[in-house]
Amino acid sequence: MSKDVAKERSMIIQKEMITQLFKELSAAKETGKKVVYTFVPGNISELILSFGMLPVYPEINALQSGMRKKSGDYIRDAEQHGHSEDVCTYVKCDVGMMLNGNIGPTGEKIPSPDLLLLSYTGCFTFLKWFETLERLYPGVPVALLHTPYQEAGKVTPQMTAYMVKQLKEEVIPKMEKVSGNKYDEEKLKSILRNSSKVEDYIVKIFDTTKHRPSPIDAYFAGVYYIGPINSGFRGTPEAVDYYAELYKEILTRIEKKLGPITPEGEMEEERFRLVVEGPPNWTHFREFWKLFYDMGAVIVASSYTKVGGVYDMGFRVNPDKPLESLAEYCMNCYTNLNLPQRVELLSKCITDYHADGFLVNSIKSCNSFSAGQLMIMQQLERKLEIPIGFIESDLVDPRYFSYSNIKNRLESFFQMLEQRKMIFTRQ
Amino acid sequence: MNTLNGIVTQCEKLAFDLSFKRARAWKSQEKDRILIGHMPVYFPREIIHAANGLAVGILGGGDKKLIIKGDAYYQSYICHIPRSIVELALDKHFADFDGFIFPSICDVIRNLSGMFQLLGEGKFVKYLDFPQNFVSNIGGEFYRYELQTVLDEVYKLNGVEVTPQRLNHSIGLFNINRNLIKQLYDIRQEFPWRLSAADVYHIVRAGYVIPVEEHNEILTQVIGLIGVETGSPMDKIRVLVIGAFCEQPPVGLIRTIELAGCYIVEDDFLLGARWIQGDIETNTADPLKSITGAYLEKSTFSSSVYDVGNPKEARLLKLIQQRKVDGVIFAAPSFCDPALLDHPILQKECNDKNIRFISFLFSENTGQFKVIKEQVGTFSDSIKLWDEPLANDKL
């Protein structure tokens, strides 16, 4: 596998943005900027930014540790401190990273939090994670934002009212106290205007996979595309510029009828179009991706890129109703959708993007995704008569990535898709 | 009068009757009666009772149900209880149930509610999103809305209006029930040899599948019978077992712990029956408010509830003190995120306070207890032989 990675301008912009954020974080104690730890799904970064504070996302740190091959040691350290082998590896990786000095992906120390913002959206383990963090950082205030689950497949006015009340009476007062700044609704509205633009771009970008060949990979490259909006840049002008540039690049690719960019350059031939459910494995990300692009498989839609927000069903933040909008954004994240909604959404992706197959990457330590996936598979198979593939790995625990096992299963899956294509061609 | 053995045998049959015969017979006696299945940990059964319904505990198939189809719905790294519940559903054990409640415990149970929706089980399926905000006008209001949603669904089924009088009456019956269970646990704390932990388990679990009025009668009889001395104390340590609040331990495991030299004087096996600590108001024009208030202010602690401002390790210590416990057994189901993520926090506190503990995993259908028996036996011996009794003032 080549060590040189092909890069487009948007990738370089993104790298610069992230580097700048981590620089700001490492200097936070000197500059006096307050630091807020929070989560990606339901990340109300606009509110954090409106108070002039900096967000840190423990899951992002964990996945970065996974990509930098550090998570295995971190997880082992956490297990030595009493954490079970059975539980979420993001939590253990984060605990292990903290035990080892809290060094971030750029090699700089991530500052301790001034506020723990537990925006609990679509993942129960977030609650447990922050109970652990609360004890690792004693005395740091916790602001809890409970996002009601879309159990009946809808957001009701009462659910929104509950969240707005929490924002007004629990979250905002704590942010005011920690930051020393008063809540400024006009500022929040102006930040949300940028978020709305970014959300439009994201929908357009992921919708380009309707083209043949698809100009992007909506899973492996998709996780980079959702990077800025999910790592502290929601509502920033930098995010608007980044997505505008990215969209422009993709339009050029469409014009030139080019396939997606992979770490080894352009994918030459698009043989299979897939929709993927579940997060990727981070510890062997490039090897994992290579298994697909070597076979000419491109991912035309994925549920994971919707984990920080689902925009393709019409939702946009409304700057005129800032708190209601933040609430509804949180409730619309993918893992906050009930199972029938997930089936519906995946079904729409398969149909709209003309997928040849549906693949589940089942993650050992992420029950929020994994529990129910087998039933989702059954439902889609019955409804759409589409070939289904199933592989298993983990987020950041390298012990659960079995290359040969995954390769074997994928090869069988691709053979099945190939045979099906041949039959359809004959017919 | 029934003998203690007779009552326990009857309760054991009821507790593990996966056909829910008593509940179905009760339903068949009146046209507008309904059965609402609910999972652990806690559900305010009072509101179903007031609507002429019976809230029936769905606690999994335990070691009484062979899982074949259920395994096809879950990956190997997901706990056992949802697969046995799916198996029960697919085998039509819940055929006479009208609705299902899935209280918020974890992501697996949350998604199980969606699976029931996709399977078309019952006339309604509700994931009951318990508030993690404990402020009355925020979390309290939302919780009230959640309960009202359940009541609206039930009303659609049988048209029974839940008046304040009806609900107050139901609250009163469940207050009695909790008081009786508390008395049962209190007697066991003082005289654990009078009734085994497995017997207590059967008696409390029977209350999940029969009308509360009948359960109150059973509890009253049991308390009368064990109020007088029976049996004699044995040289065992007193333990608290924690971690099994959702997926239930096999009864063989409970027996094994007691056979290996322990008296289980506190546990969280059927925590929902004891969730509210104390009485809920019964003489009010707004009983739903009383129920929500009780949840916010009188709940016990559990891994399913965020504990900001009310740390669970402090509450565990208080319980250890109250029950005069010699050691703690952390027994959690395999792959149970909430329980297992709590363990490092709780175990650190035990270490800091010099409280002895052991830890092991189980699943509801675990059938081999030899290793656990040896582990618990060694734990018991080490405390009996080498430890000084825990001084309460050091906790």
Image (tube, rainbow, N blue to C red):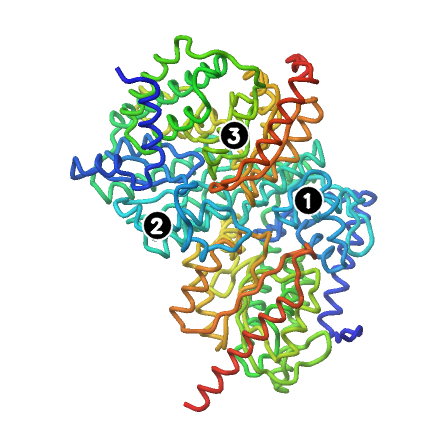
What is the CA distance from the residue labelled 3 to the residue labelled 2?
30 Å
Q: Is residue A388 rendered to the left or right of residue A188?
A: left
Name the residue furthest bottom: A426
Distance (Cα) linking label 2 and label 1: 44 Å
Question: The residue under label 3 is which amino acid type?
Answer: Thr
Of labels 1 and 3, the one closer to you: 3
Q: Position of residue B381 (x, y in %)?
A: 64, 22
Residue to which mark 1 is pinned: A36
Q: Is residue B78 left or right of residue A29?
A: left
Q: Which chain is home to disc 3?
A: B
Instruction: Tell me the quarter of the image containing the N terminus of chain B.
Output: top left
Of badges 2 and 1, the one in the foreground is 2
Residue receiving disc 2:
B89
Residue at (72% x, 70% y) in the render: A11
Residue A226: x, y in percent? 63, 63
Say which of B12 and A226 sits in front. Answer: B12
Q: Residues within 10 Å of mark 3 (few under 14, many from 20)?
A: many
Relative depth, front residue between A362 and A53: A362
